[in-house]
Image (cartoon, rainbow, N blue to C red):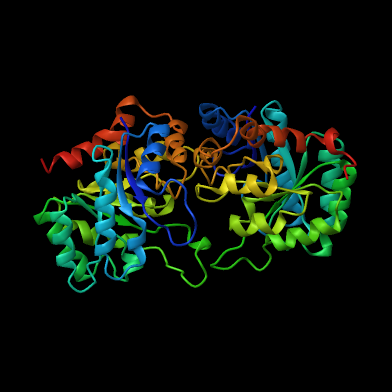
């Protein structure tokens, strides 16, 4: 099974369901079975409490529309703790969503995230954290792999997925290599040859996940990072879906060390 | 048949790349089902005098004359560039690659027009690189902004007989010049940096399949990525054939 662990649902329809139909048409042609989706109808760097509510409902609509193909992440913000914890209760504890999405509203090393992460540990779900290190300069509130490393060290029982391999993947992968509760996804950058092999060499295939960052990115350009990489069949299967199936299945890592 | 219109071989300065030497690059082509590739040379990018890079490329491609189509690096802002071009012609190059952002000139500059005139005289294909890689990942002491693509009309207008390929052009940049590409019979885009879900299908709608070339930017990028883009969109067999090879063959055949 091929699982794309990093998909967004904006810009291709009036409803979440229309966005799902649009994406699945393309995913089908590439053999991608499941999309793990997050964020809302539009992308908001600094979501309000109402935005959190609306975006999570948008994702939940998508999951309920096509539960066999779509899994959802709750958009979490330390700027709106009560609304975030409430959303986690309603959408994860009570089902059907399978993890958290933390984006760019505040750097994730900030202790303001602690209550959210502690509840994620209690629920037994992973956290997908956006990271980038741009030569051209990050957003002021955008996390780097160093931020995530700090957070992961503070919460060794939490499971993180470092999105975009840190952007600058050579640095990002090395920064988190010794932190076992951080996996990475491969998405969101150009399909630079060597990224996947490099990730496997430092992290092991068990900590590397395929993701596309569709719809901004092409499913194809990102899938090519895995199909075009020099890997064993077993490594490729883990990256394409085995790892995502394991990490985003709540019963598998509830209370994990 | 598949022709890759944007590849390089040689030595990339910022990261160790696999499959960048001629024999291993041809092996990569074999694995991916790519019959021919137009190849530039990485190391010329940061050279002042590019002639040694072209010498290297010509020799490297001699071992695979049916597979690798070398394209000379030319810097028309460098003193004596005409001699560099003459030497490249004598070595049998049939196309040139321009890297204006690395060589510090604009497409609207007089030197670019002079290069185009020479390309017309010698029936050369001209590849213009908008970038070589994501600006966000550049070495902090070697940051090179992307080329201003909107000046491309100035480049092609005066020389309608010279085919110009915009290489490593991103989706938003294509949108910015889509009307120009559609109107100019000699202007093409390749897909190596095209992004967005269903990007190739959308691009066909924007500029027409006749203006699109298959390009991978291998071995800097995974060759598979561009191949999968062609599968991601629902494309007619006719359009796919045009993009994979027929457009490139038509451009190259005009020299015969």
Query: Looking at the figure, which quarter contains the C terminus of chain B?
Result: top left
Residue in front for this viewpoint, B8 or B204: B8
Residue at 83% from the left image edge and 45% from the top image edge: A88
Residue in front for this viewpoint, A185 or A178: A178
Decide if residue B240 is on the left or right side of residue A82: left
Instruction: Give the image quarter of residue B241.
Output: top left
Residue at 24% from the left image edge and 52% from the top image edge: B58
Residue in front for this viewpoint, A121 or B202: A121
Query: Looking at the figure, which quarter contains the N terminus of chain B?
Result: top left
Task: Report how many numbered discs are placed on residues in the image.
Answer: 0
Residue at 52% from the left image edge and 31% from the top image edge: A26
Q: Position of residue B47 (x, y in %)?
A: 33, 68
Residue at 75% from the left image edge and 52% from the top image edge: A50
Decide if residue B189 is on the left or right side of residue A124: left
Instruction: Give the image quarter of residue B3.
Output: top left
Residue in front for this viewpoint, B220 or A251: B220
Q: Position of residue B4 (x, y in %)?
A: 33, 41
Instruction: Determine whether B76 is above or below B231 in the image.
Output: below
Q: Position of residue B25 (x, y in %)?
A: 38, 43
Decide if residue A152 is on the left or right side of residue B59: right
* Residue A82 shows in the view: no
Instruction: Give the image quarter of residue B2.
Output: top left
Decide if residue A171 is on the left or right side of residue A253: left
* Residue B236 shows in the view: yes
Q: Position of residue A231 (x, y in %)?
A: 58, 37
């Amino acid at each position: 099974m091929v699982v794309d662990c990093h998909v967004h649902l904006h810009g291709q329809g009036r409803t979440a369901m229309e966005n799902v139909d649009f994406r699945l048409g393309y995913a089908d042609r590439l053999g991608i079975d499941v999309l793990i989706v997050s964020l809302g109808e539009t992308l908001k760097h600094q979501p309000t409490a109402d935005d959190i509510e609306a975006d999570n409902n948008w994702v939940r609509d998508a999951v309920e529309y096509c539960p066999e193909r779509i899994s959802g992440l709750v958009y979490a913000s330390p700027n709106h703790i009560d609304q975030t914890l409430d959303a986690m209760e309603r959408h994860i504890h009570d089902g059907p969503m399978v993890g958290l999405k933390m984006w760019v509203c505040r750097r994730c090393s900030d202790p303001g995230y602690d209550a959210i992460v502690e509840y994620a540990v209690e629920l037994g779900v992973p956290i997908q954290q956006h990271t980038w290190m741009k030569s051209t300069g990050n957003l002021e509130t955008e996390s780097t792999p160093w931020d995530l490393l700090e957070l992961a060290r503070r919460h060794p029982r939490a499971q993180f997925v470092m999105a975009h391999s840190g952007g600058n993947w050579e640095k990002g992968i090395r920064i988190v290599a010794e932190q076992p509760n951080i996996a990475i996804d491969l998405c969101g950058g150009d399909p630079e040859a060597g990224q996947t092999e490099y990730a496997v060499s430092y992290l092991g295939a068990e900590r590397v996940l395929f993701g596309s960052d569709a719809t901004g990115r092409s499913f194809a350009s990102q899938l090519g990072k895995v199909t075009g990489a020099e890997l064993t069949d077993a490594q490729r299967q883990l990256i394409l879906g085995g790892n995502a199936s394991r990490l985003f299945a709540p019963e598998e890592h509830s209370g994990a060390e | 048949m598949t022709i890759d219109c944007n590849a390089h071989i040689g030595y990339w300065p910022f990261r160790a790349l696999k499959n960048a030497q001629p024999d291993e690059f041809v092996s990569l082509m074999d694995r991916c089902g790519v019959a021919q590739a137009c190849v530039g040379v990485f190391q010329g990018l940061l050279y002042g005098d590019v002639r040694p890079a072209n010498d290297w490329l010509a020799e490297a491609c001699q071992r695979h004359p049916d597979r690798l189509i070398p394209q000379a690096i030319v810097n028309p802002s460098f003193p004596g560039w005409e001699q560099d071009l003459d030497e490249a012609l004598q070595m049998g190059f049939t196309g040139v690659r321009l890297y204006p952002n690395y060589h510090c000139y604009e497409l609207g500059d007089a030197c670019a027009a002079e290069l185009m005139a020479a390309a017309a005289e010698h029936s050369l294909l001209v590849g213009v690189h908008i970038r070589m890689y994501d600006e966000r990942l550049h070495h902090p002491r070697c940051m090179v902004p992307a080329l201003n693509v909107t000046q491309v009309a100035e480049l092609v207008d005066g020389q309608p007989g010279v085919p110009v390929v915009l290489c490593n052009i991103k989706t938003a940049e294509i949108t910015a010049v889509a009307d120009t590409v559609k109107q100019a019979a000699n202007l093409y885009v390749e897909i190596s940096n095209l992004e967005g879900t269903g990007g190739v299908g959308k691009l066909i709608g924007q500029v027409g399949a006749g203006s699109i070339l298959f390009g991978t930017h291998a071995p800097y990028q995974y060759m598979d990525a561009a191949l999968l883009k062609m599968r991601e969109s629902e494309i007619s067999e006719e359009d796919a054939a045009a993009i994979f090879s027929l457009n490139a063959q038509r451009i190259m055949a005009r020299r015969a």
